Image (cartoon, rainbow, N blue to C red):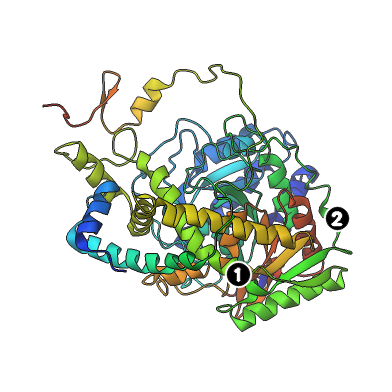
Amino acid sequence: MSRIEALDTVSGQLAALAAGSATAIALVERSLERAAALVELNALITTTADAARATAARLTPGSGPLAGVPFAQKDLFCTRGVRTTCGSRMLADFIAPYDATVSERLNAAGAVSIGKANMDEFAMGSSNENSFFGPVRNPWDRQRVPGGSSGGSAALVAAGVVPFATGSDTGGSVRQPAALCGVVGLKPTYGRVSRYGMVAYASSLDQAGVLAHTADDCARVLAAIAGADPRDATCSTRPLDDYVGALGSGVRGLRIGVVAEYFGAGVDPAVAQAVRGALQVLEREGAVLVDVRLPSLPLSIPAYYVLAPAEASSNLARYDGVRFGHRCDAPTDLADLYGRSRAEGFGTEVKRRILAGTYVLSAGYYDAYYRRAQRVRRLIANDYQRAFTEVDLLAGPTAPDVAFALGEKAADPLAMYAADVNTVAVNLAGLPAISVPAGFVTGLPVGLQLVGPAFGETRLLAAAHALQLVSDWHLQAPGAAA
Amino acid sequence: MALDSATLVHLARLARLSLGASELELLGADLDRTLAMIDQLQQIDVNGLEPLAQPQAPDTGNRVDSVTEEDHSAQLLGLSPAAEGGYFLVPKVIE
C-alpha cells in the first residue's frame, strides 16, 4: 500500500496555501488531473473544470476558512447553473436556479467545487449501483462497490482526487461508503446542517454530511456548513460548538459503550476483530470500554423500510413531468403524462420504494404500518437515550463486511437492506455518528462507527481524532492495491 | 402474504407509475418480500409508546410573516419541459 500525501488532506492543503508552497489554481489543477486519470471510477457525474479554474483565479488567499481547497459535492445538492441529477434520469437535465445552503456556505468559505459526485438514484442504495449514470468503482478494488449512496464522494476522497466531499445520510449513506472506501464519514445530528436545496428522500431522516481523510478535516468542513438557516425550519438554531478547537480533548476517561448488537449475526468475524482492535487502541489512550445493549436495534430495518419509503413516496410525488424533470413524449392525457413520465424517469430501486411507501400509507394500512413503525422508532430512540445515561459514545462496526463485488447483491435488495442495520438505527434516533478507518481485511478497508448523543459532534470528532493520532489506517492509499 | 395483481395495479395507479405487466410482477414480488420483512413489527408491544415523527423537535419558532423571495417565475417556468405564456402546459383535462 502507498500512503496519502499531506496535500490529500484539507489541513495539509491549507498549510501549503498559507506557506505559499501551493496556490488555489495549482490545487484545482491537481484535482482535475487526478479526476481525469481516474475517470474509470465513474465517481463524477459532472465536472466543472472551467468554473473551478475561474473560482480559484478569483480567490484571495486566506479569505475564508477553506479558501483554495477543492472539493466535490454529492449530486443532490442544488448548484445554480450546474445540473443536479440526483443520479436519476428524472433529473438528468435539471439545472437548479439556486444553490443549496451547504453549497453556498462552502463557496463562501472559499472552497472550490470541481464537480458533482455520482450517487445512488435519489440516495436510495448502499452500493452506488442504482445510479442512472452507472456504478462507481471502489478505488481499492475496481471490481467492488464503493458503498452508497454517497459512493462517488467516498471514492473521490479515497482516490485522492479531492481532500473532502459532501454527502447525505438517510440510513448510512455517508458512513457506509466511508467505511468501504477507507475514509472518514461524518453524519451530524438531525437538524445540525441545513437541508435547503438538498434533494429530499426521507425528510425525518435526511442529514447532510462530510467525507474526508481525517476527523480534523471533517471538523473544519462541519464548522463551515453547520448552523441555523431560516430557509430550513428543521435546522436547529442551537449555537455551534468549536469543532476544530475541541479536537485535542482526547479520550481519557471517556466511556465508550461497545454495543453487543452492533456485533450481531451477519458481521464478518474479521471485521469485528479489526473494530475491536481499534477500540483497544482507544482504550490504551485512556478510554473506558463498557459493554452496552441496544435490544431494539434489530427492529431498525423493518421500521426504516416503512418510514423511509413512506416519506419517499410523498417527497417524490413532485416529479410529475409538469414543472421540471423528465416528461414522456406525446402524453394522451394527464394520467398518462404522470404515469409514463414517472415510470420512465425513475429506476427500479426508486420504484420499489415508492410502491412500498404507497402501500404502507394507503387507506386501511396507515395505523398498522406507518403509525406502528413510528412507535417502534420511539422504542429505538429510547434505547439510545438509556445507553447515553451510562456512556459518552457508542461503538461498533459501521458495516458488517468489507466492500462486496459489483453485482453481488444486486439481485437481492433485502440482503442489501439488512446490511445497514448499524447505520440506519442512528438516523431513526436522529443522532450524530462518524465512521473512522479501523483496519483492513483482505486488503480492503474496515470502518469503526462511533455514535454520540444529540449535538455531541465535538466528542465524536475528538475521539476519532485521538484514534487517528496513534493509528495509520487512514494514511493508507489505494494506489498499489487497486 | 402475496399481493394479488388487482391490488398491485391499484397500487401502481395510486403511485402514478405506468408499469408494464412484467415490471409490475417483478416489483410486486419484491414488495411481497419487503412486506414479509416489515411484518415483524406486528409482534412488538407498542402500548404506551408515543409515535416519533421527527427526532429533534424544531427549535426555530415562527418567522416574521414577510416576503423574502423575489419573483422567480420566469426562471422556474424555464425549467418546465412545456410552458407557454406564463403557464405550465399539460394535456387537455376538460373536454
Relative image position of residue A388 (x, y in whole percent): 75, 59
The chain containing the residue under callout 2 comes to: A
Question: Label 2: how many residues lie within 10 Å, few (<14), some (14-19) or many (20+)?
Answer: some
Q: In this view, which residue lies farthest toward the front?
A: B47
Amino acid of disc 1: Pro
Relative image position of residue A98 (x, y in whole percent): 49, 31
Question: Label 1: how many residues lie within 10 Å, few (<14), some (14-19) or many (20+)?
Answer: many
Decide which of A458, A145 is in the foreground and name it.
A458
The chain containing the residue under callout 1 comes to: A
**In this figure, which residue is indicated by the disc labeled 2?**
A248
* The N terminus of chain B lies in quadrant: bottom left
Same chain check for tags 1 and 2: yes
Labelled disc at residue A478: 1
Secondary structure under tag 1 reads: loop
Decide which of A477, A74 is in the foreground and name it.
A74
Cα–Cα gap, marks 1 and 2: 28 Å
Decide which of A230, A126 is in the foreground and name it.
A230
Q: Which callout, 1 or 2, points at the residue further toward the start of the chain?
A: 2
Locate residue A254: give its quadrant: bottom right
